């Protein structure tokens, strides 16, 4: 069952095209990872998917009654705004103490309810955001670079938590990340984005795709950690616009 | 009882303080301090137009405040920094207002009354407007409370939760315009922003949740109005500025408490 489908999606900002010709879909229960270099339109795509920006072209179709749990890239809370974790979880829809406690346990941080949001560490903060996203019993969990600022063990643990949540709740998960090795091992599909969809498919297919390797190079330890053998064939590809190529030996 | 000008003044001040406190919290949380200033300064233009067209000052100020606030919302993020847009609009609106007032022939306008307030001269009608406007603002904030909070914390989270952040911004803009319109007689155009920001800032070290902070800000706003009015009567000082001084004193005390707690804790 399709949760979200886009056809020919384009988003234009004044002076530049952030996304064009994006055909994308995510099905019930899937884990899909979007990878791409900085400025490749990953966040723009997410924002278009949740309806925060209107497409300049093409269409975005969401399943009727689709419930989305959204974990944003970063959230700055003004120090002038006092708010406890429990109160934060109750926005915008009030939840019971039991519900917020369940959500915090699900995210692996059962003891934070009474703490001030501004007093949390980076990892705790992200888990509270994750807990919040699960409160609406979502069909789809969307995480935008959710492990930015976490160290390697921290983000690995975070991703294990997400897999556990998917097992328990049966929701689909859409990730945006640059930490390719951790993410890709858990994904059903990977979409490689650079203003448009460069390539997509199962993680091993994408990792060996010339388009992907042209974008990320073979020197990125992440891809190599998963796929030991080296590709020595030609990685040129036929996109009309320049990508940032890393040297491939 | 309402025949006594002091009672009317106290009621008007109290109404403005109680309503400005909670709204001021949003002004502080959203870093809109300058925004409040721009809207308040533009109110002088509203006064001039109201007198020119012979409509109520309240209506004139309300309309101009809404217009300027919407103009700021529209212009920001279009090439100019928000502080630049506000700087241009706040001071231009004030200047245009002052010039416009000088064109009013045959109408004697006590400009000082609108710049610094004239709380001892408020009429029964003014008191009624203050309390109706104040109740309207509190009602708006209570009605949209959760949505306003999440839109303040993160427009993206709000959007994902089915809330339109622009709509919430519009509601705050409207509330701001109402407060400016009812407060101009009480503390004057130049000091309205102080009644928004100082009680909220003073409430911050004393609160653990947003709701608590709004309540405390409201109480501090009310207390400042009554205390300031009392002091003005006692020391024969201008009422509007004295009210703001009272708020500043409470802020200093609260900041000291916050600092001490920080040291000890």
Image (cartoon, coloured by chain):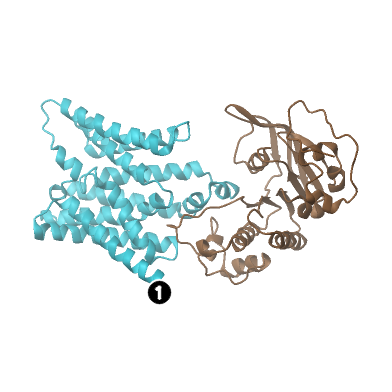
The residue depicted at 15 percent of the width and 37 percent of the height is B111
The chain letter under disc 1 is B
Q: Nearer the viewer, residue A212 or B174?
A: A212
The spot of residue B95 in percent (x, y) is: 24, 31
The residue depicted at 15 percent of the width and 60 percent of the height is B230
Give the colour in which the image draws chain B: cyan
The spot of residue A9 in percent (x, y) is: 70, 33
Q: Nearer the viewer, residue B255 or B63?
A: B255
The spot of residue A7 in percent (x, y) is: 74, 33
The residue depicted at 22 percent of the width and 37 percent of the height is B57
- Quadrant of the rendered image containing residue A15: top right
Residue A29 visible in rendering: no
State the residue lying farthest toward the front. Answer: A249
Residue bearing the label numbered 1: B264
The spot of residue B214 in percent (x, y) is: 38, 59
Give the colour in which the image draws chain A: brown
The residue depicted at 59 percent of the width and 72 percent of the height is A111
Q: Secondary structure at mark 1?
A: helix
- Quadrant of the rendered image containing residue B247: bottom left
């Amino acid at each position: 069952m399709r949760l979200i489908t886009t056809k020919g999606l384009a988003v234009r900002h004044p002076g530049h095209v952030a996304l064009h010709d994006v055909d994308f879909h995510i099905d019930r229960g899937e884990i899909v990872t979007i990878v791409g270099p900085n400025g490749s339109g990953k966040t723009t795509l997410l924002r278009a998917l949740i309806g925060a920006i209107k497409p300049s072209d093409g269409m975005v179709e969401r399943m009727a009654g689709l419930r989305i749990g959204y974990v944003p890239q970063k959230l700055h809370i003004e120090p002038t705004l006092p708010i406890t974790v429990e109160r934060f979880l109750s926005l915008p829809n009030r939840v019971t103490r039991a519900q917020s406690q369940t959500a915090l346990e699900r995210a692996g941080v059962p003891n934070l309810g009474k703490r001030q949001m501004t007093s949390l560490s980076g990892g705790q903060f992200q888990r509270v955001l994750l807990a919040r996203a699960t409160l609406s019993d979502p069909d789809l969990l969307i995480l935008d670079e959710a492990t930015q600022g976490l160290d390697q063990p921290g983000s690995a643990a975070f991703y294990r938590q997400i897999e556990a949540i998917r097992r328990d709740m049966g929701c689909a998960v859409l990730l945006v990340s640059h930490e390719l090795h951790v993410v890709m091992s858990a994904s059903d599909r990977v979409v490689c984005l650079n203003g448009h969809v460069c390539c997509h498919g199962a993680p091993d297919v994408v990792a060996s795709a010339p388009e992907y390797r042209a974008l990320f190079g073979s020197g990125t330890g992440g891809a190599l950690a998963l796929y030991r053998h080296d590709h020595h064939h030609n990685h040129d590809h036929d996109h009309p616009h320049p990508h940032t190529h890393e040297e491939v030996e | 009882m309402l025949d006594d000008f002091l009672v009317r003044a106290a009621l008007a001040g109290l109404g403005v303080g109680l309503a400005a406190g909670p709204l001021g919290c949003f002004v502080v949380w959203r870093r809109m301090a300058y925004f409040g200033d721009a809207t308040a300064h533009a109110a002088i233009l509203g006064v001039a137009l109201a007198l020119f067209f012979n409509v109520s000052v309240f209506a004139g100020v309300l309309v101009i405040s809404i217009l300027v606030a919407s103009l700021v919302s529209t212009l920001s993020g279009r090439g100019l920094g928000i502080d630049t847009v506000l700087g241009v609009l706040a001071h231009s609106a004030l200047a245009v207002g002052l010039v416009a007032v000088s064109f009013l022939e045959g109408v004697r306008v006590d400009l000082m009354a609108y710049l610094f307030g004239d709380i001892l001269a408020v009429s029964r009608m003014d008191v009624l407007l203050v309390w109706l406007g104040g109740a309207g603002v509190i009602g708006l904030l209570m009605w949209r409370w959760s949505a306003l909070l999440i839109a303040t914390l993160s427009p993206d989270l709000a959007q994902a939760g089915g809330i339109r952040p622009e709509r919430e911004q519009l509601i705050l803009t409207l509330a701001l315009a109402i407060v400016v319109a009812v407060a101009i007689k009480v503390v004057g155009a130049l000091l309205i922003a102080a009644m928004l920001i100082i009680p909220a800032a003073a409430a911050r070290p004393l609160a653990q949740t947003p709701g608590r902070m709004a309540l405390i800000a409201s109480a501090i706003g009310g207390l400042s109005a009554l205390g300031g009015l009392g002091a003005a009567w006692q020391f024969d000082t201008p009422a509007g500025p004295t009210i703001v001084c009272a708020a500043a004193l409470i802020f200093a005390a609260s900041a000291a408490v916050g600092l001490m707690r920080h040291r000890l804790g």
